[in-house]
Structures are given as C-alpha cells and as structure tokens.
Amino acid sequence: QVQLVESGGGSVQAGGSLRLSCVASGYVYSRWHVAWFRQAPGKEREGVASIFSLGGNMRYADSVKGRFTISQSQDNAKITVYLRMNSLKPEDTAMYYCAVSLLAPMNALLPDEYKYWGRGTQVTVSS
C-alpha cells in the first residue's frame, strides 16, 4: 500500500509562486510514476505534470508549460515529489492532488492511469 500526503498549498496573488510537496511512503518500488492533478469546482480533474522515477521523463499540460516544474527526491523510506509553480494565474486555482502508478501509464496525465491518490492541497490565486 502506498500513502501520499500533499502539502504546500495556500493563497497567493496572481504572478506569485508556490511549491507543493507530495510525500509517498509505504511499499514504494524503485520504479514508479507520479503525477500532479488538479480539480476546480465544477470541472473535471486534469493532469498537470508527471515524472518517472528513473530518468525523469517529465510531462506537462500545455496550460502550465514554462511555469510549473516537477521534480523528485528519494531516500530509502520515502519519495518526495515537488511541483514548483511560478507566474500563477487565477485559473490555476484548484485542489491539487498527487497520484502514483506502479505501472507504466499509456497517458501519464490521465487520472484513470493512477491507483494511489492523496487527499489534496488547495491552491487559490487571486487577481
């Protein structure tokens, strides 16, 4: 079982920055795929960024390219995945979730590809 805990959300003004963290613990394999998703009220959950534990292979949604950066660090017991968000816009306001897949996803930004999910952290960007 994999446990995921997100943190780092908050309220910022447009143009500001935040760094989200996701700590993955439990039965964590050396090969894993992690993604950040977000969901705004009344909208579908959408993939934001993804990363593979071996070799990076980062992917980003078009709406965040050039503004968001996904990265990861790993020790023996846990993995931490970060989402650095710069030049934030009001449309970035959403609940942000991290998710883990232990299998290679066909589409790394598709929610259905991921089995393990955190509870989310809220990001609010004001204009």
Image (cartoon, helix red, strand yellow):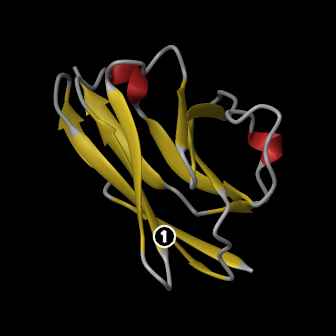
- 72 vs 21, nearest the viewer: 72
Label 1 neighbour load within 10 Å: few <14, some 14-19, many 20+ = many
Figure quadrant of residue 6? bottom left
Figure quadrant of residue 74? bottom left
- 100 vs 41, nearest the viewer: 100
One can see residue 66 in this view = yes
Compared to residue 46, the image places residue 96 above or below, namely: below
Compared to residue 85, the image places residue 54 above or below, namely: below
- What residue did someone put label 1 on? 79
Name the residue at 70% across, 36% down. 108
Q: Residue furthest front?
A: 55
- 20 vs 53, nearest the viewer: 53
Name the residue at 62% across, 76% down. 3
Q: How many marks?
A: 1
Q: Secondary structure at mark 1?
A: strand
Residue 93: image location, x then y, percent: 40, 32
- 106 vs 46, nearest the viewer: 106
One can see residue 41 in this view = no
In the visual, does 112 lie left or right of 127?
right
Name the residue at 16% across, 31% down. 16
Compared to residue 47, the image places residue 61 above or below, namely: above
Residue 85: image location, x then y, percent: 30, 35
Q: Quadrant of the N terminus?
A: bottom right
In the visual, does 62 lie left or right of 105?
left
Q: Quadrant of the C terminus?
A: top left
Callout 1, which amino acid? Ile
Residue 53: image location, x then y, percent: 57, 55
Compared to residue 10, the image places residue 68 above or below, namely: above
Name the residue at 42% across, 18% down. 65
Residue 35: image location, x then y, percent: 59, 46
